[in-house]
Amino acid sequence: MADLITVNEYKDAEGLRGEKDDDRLSVIVPQVSDLVKKYCGISFVDFFSTDKVETFSVEDNFTNTIIVSESPIVSITKVEERQNYSDTYTELTTAKYEYYLDEEADAIIRTNASGNQIHWARGVGAVKITYKAGYASTPRDLQLALFDLVNYYIKDEHKERRTLGGAVQQNQGTAGMRNSTDFPDHIKRVLDLYKVVI
């Protein structure tokens, strides 16, 4: 999967020249990208131009809305439903008003020709949605947080206390709590704008 920033973008943002830290950066930058994707719960750029296929199991007769895992939705390629586990999927279309895309909620709502909401088929893997979602490139505010996060790890700021040449450096705890394992507050504020809360 694609990294959210590159080593060169980081070096340009920090005004770094030369190749002194390139080996270390080539390890940290992809790890920071993976960390942010996991923390936020979305991949940002991986499925912008590539289809993501998700299958949903519906356990009741009342579910009429399905929220996909990636956001924001760019386009819906295909929505399929099956009535029984042994059936093949049947493609639903907007031409027949069989579903509606709620772009604000990144949700697909099951509808009928009258525009009324109806429930999705019930069962294991009853609904399959193929779609594209995310951003063409990493949002600029998120890039800023990623650059700061790379700095955080490259400068070992994640270590609360370090000794350097006889001097002791005490890094401030995060989120106002002693021994917190959160990101620094200025980074966390940006990441929380994108975090998917379930």
Image (cartoon, rainbow, N blue to C red):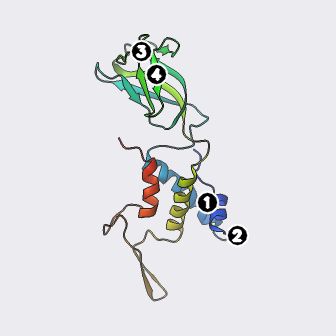
Taking the spot 61% from the left edge, 46% from the top edge, the residue there is 137
Q: Secondary structure at mark 1?
A: helix
Residue at left offset 54%, top offset 54%: 141
Q: Residues within 10 Å of mark 2 (few under 14, many from 20)?
A: few
Labelled disc at residue 26: 1
Q: Amino acid at mark 3?
A: Gly
Q: Residues within 10 Å of mark 3 (few under 14, many from 20)?
A: few
Residue 27: x, y in percent? 57, 60
Q: Which residue is mark 3?
A: 115
Q: Mark 2 falls on what kind of element?
A: loop
Q: Residues within 10 Å of mark 4 (few under 14, many from 20)?
A: some
Among the two numbered marks 1 and 2 on one chain, the one whose residue lies closer to the N terminus = 2
User: Where does residue 142 sit, x and y in percent of width and height?
Assistant: 53, 53
- Distance from disc 3 to disc 4, alpha carbons, whole Å, reads 9 Å
* Residue 51 in the image: above or below residue 148: above
Q: Nearer the viewer, mark 3 or mark 4?
A: 3
Q: CA distance from mark 1 to mark 2?
A: 15 Å
Sequence-wise, the earlier of marks 3 and 2 is 2
* Camera-side residue of 111 and 125: 111
Check the image and report above or below for 19 versus 196.
below
Q: Who comes first in sequence, dot 4 or dot 1?
A: 1
State if disc 1 and disc 4 touch (CB < 8 Å): no
Evaluate if marks 3 and 2 touch, with contact meaning CB atoms under 8 Å apart.
Answer: no
Nearest to the eye among marks 4 and 1: give it: 4
Q: Is residue 124 left or right of residue 28?
A: left
Residue 158 placement (x, y as % from top left): 44, 68
Front label number (3 vs 2): 3
Residue at (44, 32) in percent of width and height: 68
Instruction: Name the kind of residue labelled 1 in the image.
Output: Ser
- Which residue occupies the extreme bottom position in the image? 166
